[in-house]
Image (cartoon, helix red, strand yellow):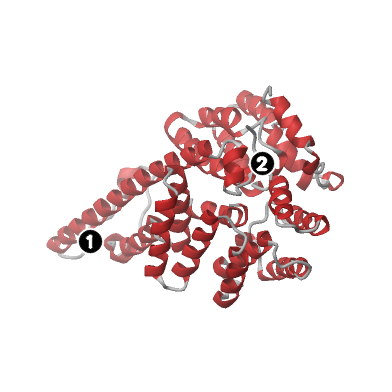
Amino acid sequence: MKKRILSIILFLVVCLGVEAVTKKELTQEVLSKIGIKQEIIDETIKLDEKFAGKPIFSMDEDELDARIKMIEEILEKDDRNFDLNDELFTIYILSEEKKDYEKAKYYLEKSDKYNDKFSSYFNNIVYNRKIGKKKEAEKIYNKLRKEFKDKPLIDLADIFLEAMTGDDEDDSLSVMDENFLENNFYLNNPIENPVVSDHPLDNVSKISEKDPEDDKEDYEGYKKMIKELTKMSVERTKKQKEEIEKMKGIVAYFSNDEKQREFNLSDDTVRGFELQFRTQEMSDIGINEGAEKAVQYYLENVVSDTATEDAIRFNKDDEESLYFSAMYLLSMTGDEKKIDKYSKQLENTRNMKILQKYYGKAESKKAPENTSKGKNKKESNKKRGK
């Protein structure tokens, strides 16, 4: 889940302000408000279109260089463009390939002049944590908590900050896995030329030549290690459930354009959060209730008739991941009738048709109607019965 959360961070830092607000609409509003020319706003929107569905964490160094060059060319025309200053800050502070704290500070100071207070606090917390100034980061974090008391806002900051600083349990669990492998007697003392039987009970480790007391001691160590791993797994599962509830609260909080505009948060970011908890819930259903129930959950909850095209295509990786997970689970049923029935439904969902439109056939790779004219929004209102 950590990587999935990180993939949304770019949207948070760049997008961190009834109906959902698309990224194009928000860019148009916030940049025109500070007097940036329409020509530059159009170039900024076009740049977003070019890299839609491509978070910086999935790009190689050449792709990042190309992206940086395009951003810098637009900033040369007007360096007040805090959307792009934010994006360069994100690249230089979070990308392993282009990490440069001096440049990150430069673009942070540029964006701070025009950013909303929540985004400014958040960016400065990230910067100070990354350069090792934990006390300063904590000081700014306390300011954020004092000024923004709504729980979903604090949860939003906490989830991202934890993901970026690597404080979750995934890393510690991997260390425990390594310790488990290093200390497992049965792995460190393989049987020479073992005879493998078709009966599973016959494959239980053959009697070791070691002293029985040594075997007992190793076995006790093995049990202790299993107990520790189980405890950590339970704790991680509990934490995942808590994060899912937080994400649900965040999505509900930002479900209207009033809050989205207030915090400069576009609908693609909100959709990204929704996909995070949908992924976990779908996985849990698949494990506990079976593959067919998980596929039904996907069709009823992940497939959306109301999410904008931008919200879906800017989350291309997660949308595709959930789709292919559903297809895989479907194949696991082994029921040809069910596979035939559901596969047709999955292939014809609105989500996949939108992705095919932009990333499938070449003739469909075109930008949607300019939302600054309000066309997409009117259609969205109509679908919701407004």
Q: Is residue 343 above or below residue 192?
A: above
For the residues carrying marks 2 and 1, which lies nearer the camera in this image? 2
Which residue is located at x 45 percent, y 49 percent?
148
Amino acid type, residue under disc 2 in the picture: Val
Q: Residue furthest right?
A: 363
- Residue 361 vs residue 20, the one in the foreground: 20
Element at badge 2? Answer: loop
Q: Of the two numbered discs 2 and 1 on the same chain, state the one appearing first in sequence.
A: 2
Image quadrant where residue 78 sits: bottom right
178 horizontally vs 354: left or right:
left
Residue 105, x across and y down, in percent: 56, 73
Residue 55, x across and y down, in percent: 63, 57
User: How many residues crowd mark 1 within 10 Å: few (<14), some (14–19), many (20+)?
Assistant: few
Mark number, residue 208: 1
Q: Is residue 247 above or below residue 100?
A: above
Amino acid type, residue under disc 1 in the picture: Ser
Q: CA distance from mark 2 to mark 1?
A: 67 Å
Which residue is located at x 55 percent, y 35 percent?
332
- Residue 34 vs residue 107, the one in the foreground: 34
Q: Is residue 270 above or below residue 127?
A: above
181 horizontally vs 158: left or right:
left
Residue named by callout 2: 21
Residue 280 visible, this angle: no
Quarter of the picture containing the C terminus is top right
Residue 261, x across and y down, in percent: 62, 44
Element at badge 1? Answer: loop
Mark number, residue 199: none
Residue 191, x across and y down, in percent: 32, 62
184 horizontally vs 303: left or right:
left
193 horizontally vs 285: left or right:
left
